[in-house]
Image (tube, rainbow, N blue to C red):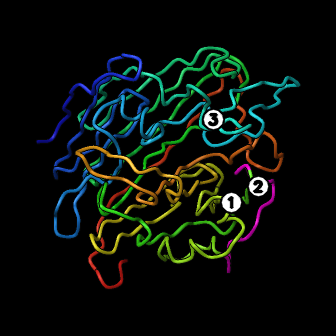
Amino acid sequence: MKGIEIKSFGNTWDGRKALCWTITNGSGAQLSLTDFGARITGICVPDRDGRMEDVVLGFDTAEEFTQKGRYFGTTVGRYANRLAGASFRLNGSVYKLYANKGTNSLHGGKSGFDDKIWKADITGEDSIRFTYESAYGEEGYPGKMDVTVCYRFTEENEVEITYRAVSDKDTIINLTNHAFYNLKGHGNGSILGHKLKLYSSFFTPVNADMVPDGSILPVKGTVMDFTGLHPIGEQIDKTDEQLRLAEGYDHNFILQKEERGSLSKAAEVVEPESGRTMTVFTDQPGIQFYSGNLMKPCTGKGGREYGKRDAFCLEAQCFPNSMEVTHFPTPVLRANDTYEQKTVYRFGICRDKEKGE
């Protein structure tokens, strides 16, 4: 039945109570969200035969996310991806962050936005707004920041995510959603047969710490070339230094933009067997494609088993480590200015099983 259902989502690792909201549209498709991390916990959409399946990996309680998959489905902040040396320089001052990935800061640090209980408000029959006040100095970042993430689930099976933030001091920001997808359905095995197209002709290579080294290289004729629709696993095990460093794909791709900041197509994914498709639109300059290389075996929601490369992520973002590379887009948010971002994940169906497109 169309509408929004609310239920308990258990307690977090330290005893905070969490809730879960499920938005059902007119066709019976569903988007599920929790206030723990303002995260996506499920997206149920039909295959070509009308069978509903949850295409997002996740867990049955809030506590399990911390134990088994901290970033699954979460809103990532204050800064998504990596910052080299767990520090950055702004206005002549050096800000030290928590190093939670070797010597680097990853996805907001030790206790990022994924670990917070956000205030939730139902803003319509198809939308929920999450808000969080990030205190001055939280995880080492300057400025008190008020953050809003709005989710809307449309009749066209689109998950619209709109982000807004304001800081009372100059700071940096890079927000994204980190849902892990398998269009066959969560727990239904490898994603290497999914076909992917990225609207990108260039990517940012990484060093041994998985931080962009500042160079920008063309994808044409390389293992990074997804300018045409082809299987994720087609070249993933080839001998290539970038694939070796990441144990697969975990790279930032520079999106083609006719106008900076415009909402445009970033990626298309097709799962040939089920016929499910996903198209990503964003106003961000980059998108991180992750092929689930470091996923550890674990039991997910409903008792389904997850393993290596059983999901992929497409994270719209500013470039990783962009404070240290002057020719990358800037993540600086000036005091009292408004940060705004929009990303849309549209789910559909391809009818041609042979072509998978």
Magenta-colored stretch includes residue 106: no
Name the side, left or right, on which 279 lies relative to 165. Answer: left
Q: CA distance from mark 1 to mark 3?
A: 22 Å
Crowdedness near tag 1: few (<14), some (14–19) or many (≥20) residues, C-alpha within 10 Å? some
Contact flag, marks 1 and 3 (Cβ < 8 Å): no
Q: Position of residue 356 (x, y in %)?
A: 35, 78
- Magenta-colored span: 209-222
Q: Are marks 2 and 1 in contact (CB under 8 Å)?
A: yes
139 horizontally vs 128: left or right: right
Q: Are marks 3 and 2 in contact (CB under 8 Å)?
A: no
Q: Please state the horizontal and vertical placement of residue 160, each as a whole percent of the image.
A: 40, 45
- From what the image shows, is residue 173 above or below residue 43? above
Where is residue 274, by image quadrant? bottom left
SS at badge 1? helix
From the image, state whether disc 1 or disc 3 is nearer to you.
1
Residue with the mark numbered 3: 79
The residue where tag 1 is placed is 245
- How packed mark 3 is, by other alpha carbons closer than 10 Å (few <14, some 14-19, many 20 or more), is many
Picture residue at 53% right of the left edge, 31% below the top: 164
Q: At label 1, which amino acid type do we have?
A: Leu
Task: Decide which of tag 2 and tag 1 comes sooner along the chain.
Answer: 2
At label 3, which amino acid type do we have? Tyr
Find disc 2 in the rendering and name its residue.
207
Q: Position of residue 187 (x, y in %)?
A: 31, 56
Is 345 positioned to the left or the right of 265 in the image?
A: left
Where disc 2 sits, the SS reads: loop
Element type at mark 3: loop
